[in-house]
């Protein structure tokens, strides 16, 4: 996700010009634009940017969330439910991997025991 486009969208929503943001951040118009366009902005500047725009810094990192829309209970519930399902699937995968590794350890021990007898 392009940081500049996210910032522009939030500024448009708040009816503020980009120059206002640069001034509030103590940066030049071109310097701020370049750092957002090239995605080379420092974290402290990014948190200051989020503070000035009155948004969470997460909106600059989350590709799946529309940063310009207000979260609704339905979208929050949907994202929580999706995240819950993903976590359940990941837990299931970890349990299966754990079981497979335990079986491999048992097999290894049996092979060592058989080789030790000869």
Image (cartoon, helix red, strand yellow):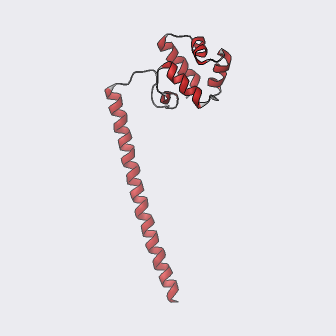
Q: Residue at x 39, y 21 (%)?
A: 70
Q: How many marks?
A: 0
Which quadrant does the N terminus fall into? Answer: top right
Q: Which residue lies furthest to the bottom in this view?
A: 118
Q: Residue at x 32, y 27 (%)?
A: 73
Query: In this rendering, is residue 25 above or below 76?
Result: above
The reply, left or right, for residue 8 in relation to residue 100 is: right
Residue at 42% x, 21% y is 69
Residue 106: give x, y in percent of width and height: 43, 73
99 lies left or right of 1 = left
> Seen in the image, is 34 located left or right of residue 112?
right
Q: Where is residue 56 in the image (x, y as percent from the top left)?
A: 46, 27
Query: Where is residue 97 drawn, in percent x and y?
Result: 43, 59
Q: In which quarter of the image is residue 68?
A: top left
Is any part of residue 68 visible from this angle?
Answer: yes
- Picture layout, residue 95 above or below residue 111: above
Please tell me whether residue 84 is drawn above or below residue 99 in the rendered image.
above
Looking at the image, residue 97 lies above or below residue 113: above
- Identify which residue is drawn at 65% across, 27% down: 38
The reply to whether residue 2 is visible in this rendering is no
x, y percentage for residue 35?
Answer: 65, 25
């Amino acid at each position: 996700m392009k940081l500049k486009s996210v910032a522009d969208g939030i500024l448009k929503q708040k009816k503020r010009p980009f120059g206002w943001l640069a001034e509030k951040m103590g940066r030049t118009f071109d310097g701020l634009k370049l750092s957002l366009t090239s995605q080379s902005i420092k974290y402290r500047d990014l948190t200051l940017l989020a503070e000035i725009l009155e948004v969470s810094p997460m909106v600059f990192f989350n590709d799946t969330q529309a940063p310009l829309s207000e979260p609704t209970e339905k979208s929050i519930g949907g994202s929580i439910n999706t995240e819950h399902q993903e976590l359940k699937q990941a837990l299931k995968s970890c349990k299966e991997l754990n079981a497979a590794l335990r079986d491999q350890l048992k097999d290894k021990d049996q092979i060592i025991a058989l080789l030790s007898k000869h």
